[in-house]
Image (cartoon, helix red, strand yellow):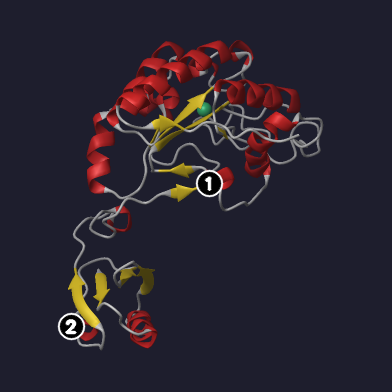
Amino acid sequence: MLIVMRHGAPEEDIQRVAATIEEMGYQARPMPGKQRTTIGLVGNDGRVDGSRLAALPGVQEIIHVTKPYKQVSREWKAETTIVRLSGGLAVGGEEVVVMAGPCSVESEPQILEAARAVREAGATVLRAGAYKPRSSPYSFQGMGRAGRSGKPILLKRGLSATIQELLLSAEYILAEGNPNVILCERGVRGFDPATRNILDLSAIAVVHGLSHLPIIADPSHGTGHRDMVTPMARAAVAAGADGLLIEVHPSPDRALSDGAQSLYPTQFDLMMKETRLIAEAIGRRVAEPAEVQA
Ligand code: MN
């Protein structure tokens, strides 16, 4: 449920609504807007009787959100959300953000080589999993924080200035408990093998209509085959994806996980060139790495 406050409603009215929501046993999520503040009510299973809230001062309207995925829906928030990352990157705006790298962090030389390769090709975010909750508990589970050497991989050591910015995101990934990084790839997919080869790109157009959140397409896990990654990446950008998540490995044949779907660096370079053309054709552009000063 959404409680829309009147234009210019004083802070005390907003706080009173929020306090009443808490009293009723739910949680309040105030969302200040340009025109007016809206307060979301979460934590309910079914329809909530909003009459008590409707009677409070400053309340203009009560909107019942019908979607089960209410907080991500455009009913909840009409304007598109732009997610801001470090280095001035924004996901969900005009730019298409390409995130690339190996499935998992395997060693310091491997992650550094991968980072250099994807940055040279034009990726702006490095992807790499430190923890790999795989379908089988006997598969490679990732290096975790310690890694096989028994000490943390120090990504800042010995790297050139031009890739420093990109490697900072690898450091984030390795920083245990960092709330800004999603370590698990299995967010929207239930069971990995069951979702292979069913990358449905029409979902991009459908979800953009239903949700205010940006959409990142993952043609690597969505297809599971290296040869299908570039065509699906091109199609995803054409369909309106706000970003791409691409697995690239310096030596895919020796990858500890997801080697079959990992692009060789040269393939990724070509994919980037083609993706830029597609983005331009629909009035967008691919985000380019900032030049990092030595
Ligand atoms: Mn993977």
Quarter of the image where the N terminus is located:
bottom left
Q: Describe the element under mark 1 as helix, strand or loop.
A: loop
The amino acid type, in three-letter code, at marker 2 is: Ser
Count up the numbered dots: 2
Whether pointer 1 and pointer 2 mark residues with C-beta atoms closer than 8 Å, the reply is: no
Q: Describe the element under mark 2 as helix, strand or loop.
A: helix
Mark 1 or mark 2, earlier in chain: 2
Check residue 85 in the rendering and tell me which mark sits there, or answer none.
Answer: 1
Q: Picture quarter containing residue 207? A: top left
- Disc 2 marks which residue? 51
Check residue 32 in the rendering and tell me which mark sits there, or answer none.
Answer: none
Q: Is the C-beta of the residue carrying label 2 under 8 Å from the nearest atom of ligand 1? A: no
Q: Picture quarter containing residue 198? A: top left
Instruction: Please determine whether, in this image, residue 207 is positioned above or below residue 257.
Output: below
Q: Depth check: 25 or 38 in front?
A: 38
**Which residue is pictured at 52% across the width and 18% down the height?**
262
Mark 1 or 2: in front is: 1
The amino acid type, in three-letter code, at marker 1 is: Leu
Instruction: Please determine whether, in this image, residue 5 is positioned above or below residue 239.
Output: below
Instruction: Please determine whether, in this image, residue 185 is positioned above or below residue 103.
Output: below
Crowding near pointer 2: few (<14 within 10 Å), some, many (20+)? few
Q: Picture quarter containing residue 142? A: top right
Q: Position of residue 261 (x, y in %)?
A: 48, 17
Q: Position of residue 12 (x, y in %)?
A: 38, 87
Q: Depth check: 112 or 1 in front?
A: 112
**Which residue is pictured at 26% across the width and 74% down the height?**
3
Q: Is residue 223 in sight in this rendering? A: no
Q: Position of residue 143 (x, y in %)?
A: 68, 34
Q: Is residue 272 in sight in this rendering? A: yes
